[in-house]
Amino acid sequence: MISFTQAIILGLLQGLSELFPISSLGHTVIIPSLIGWHIDQGSNAFVEFLVVTHLATALVLFIFFIADWMLILKGMGISLKERAIQKENSYGKLGWLIVVATVPVGILGILFEQKLKDLFASPFAASLFLIANGLLLYAAEKMTQKEDAVSQYINTAHIDERISHLSFGKAIWVGAAQCLALLPGFSRTGSTLSGGLVQKLDHQAAARFSFLLATPVIFAAAVLKLPELFISPSSALLGPLVAGFIASALAAFFAVKFLTNYFKTKTLKPFAWYCVIAGVISSVILFLR
């Protein structure tokens, strides 16, 4: 059973770490173990909690970018009507890039998500993957060698036009990168950001594409598990679920608002160092227990 206080803390943690490139699943697995919470993460109650907090994050992302989603859907409708994606229809191209990039994680998630979580979802394994996530973020920065990317792009094409210049093949690679997030400790945001940087997007464009791509993925994952909310309904769970939902939504709103501004001028390196340091400390503590 999750207490009211635990629900708020885990909700805040979920909302922040889902969008910050530091792995929500990894933190959800590691933190309760480090502080001595005895939570059965395989129980229906915990699954229900994760569904609700992920749904909150997805709704916040959709509402935050709702004006953009209206333009994207309109652009996709125009492309369907014309049976072609015209060069000037950047929002239509962006919409189809999101669809294409969603395919890899959709397929692998359905086939292997639970198997991977069952195999690797121990706190110690998650801490090792958190270190690997940090190394991935740092490697993406070093591989791109584009410290001046923001100044190069900020006054040129509109951000969505920059993203729409991606080919569908490159979008698939970006989408495939987020499959790493099926392993607890790897971040969905971090992996797609890294994939975007490797495919020559600047930080701001890579972050925006990552958030737009995450919206249908997180929402679909939550909706698919909604039936599990009704397996063992309990009135005792209502308070913690509502608290977790609100906490996750507030944290997600802060995270997306902060990060959309942060990546106008900053890089992934601070998050890379955090993941490596936090992962090393966590793994040592868990190993010595």
Image (cartoon, rainbow, N blue to C red):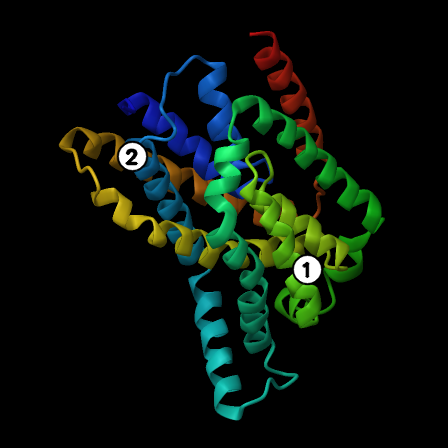
Q: Which element carries disc 1, helix, strand or loop?
A: helix
- Residue type, label 1: Trp
**For residue 5, side relative to residue 135 (left or right):** left
Residue 225 image point, x, y percent: 33, 48
The reply to whether the C-beta atoms of the residues labelled 2 and 1 are less than 8 Å apart is no
Q: Which element carries disc 2, helix, strand or loop?
A: helix
Q: Which residue is denoted by mark 2 in the rendering?
A: 44
Residue 118 image point, x, y percent: 48, 34
Q: In this picture, is 63 found above or below 183?
A: below
Residue 164 image point, x, y percent: 65, 71
* Quadrant location of the C terminus in the rendered image: top right
Residue 162: image tag: none
Q: What is the crowding at mark 1: few (fewer than 14 residues within 10 Å), some, or many (at least 20)?
A: some
Q: Which residue is denoted by mark 1 in the rendering?
A: 173
Would you say residue 268 is visible in this rendering? yes
Q: Quadrant of residue 129?
A: top right
The foreground one among 272 and 178 is 178
Would you say residue 147 is visible in this rendering? no
Q: What is the crowding at mark 2: few (fewer than 14 residues within 10 Å), some, or many (at least 20)?
A: some
**For residue 32, side relative to residue 189 (left or right):** left
* Quadrant location of the N terminus in the rendered image: top left
Residue 147 image point, x, y percent: 82, 47
Q: In this picture, is 192 found above or below 45?
A: below
Q: Which residue: 44% across, 66% down?
A: 67
- Residue type, label 2: Asn
Q: Which residue: 70% across, 65% down?
A: 170
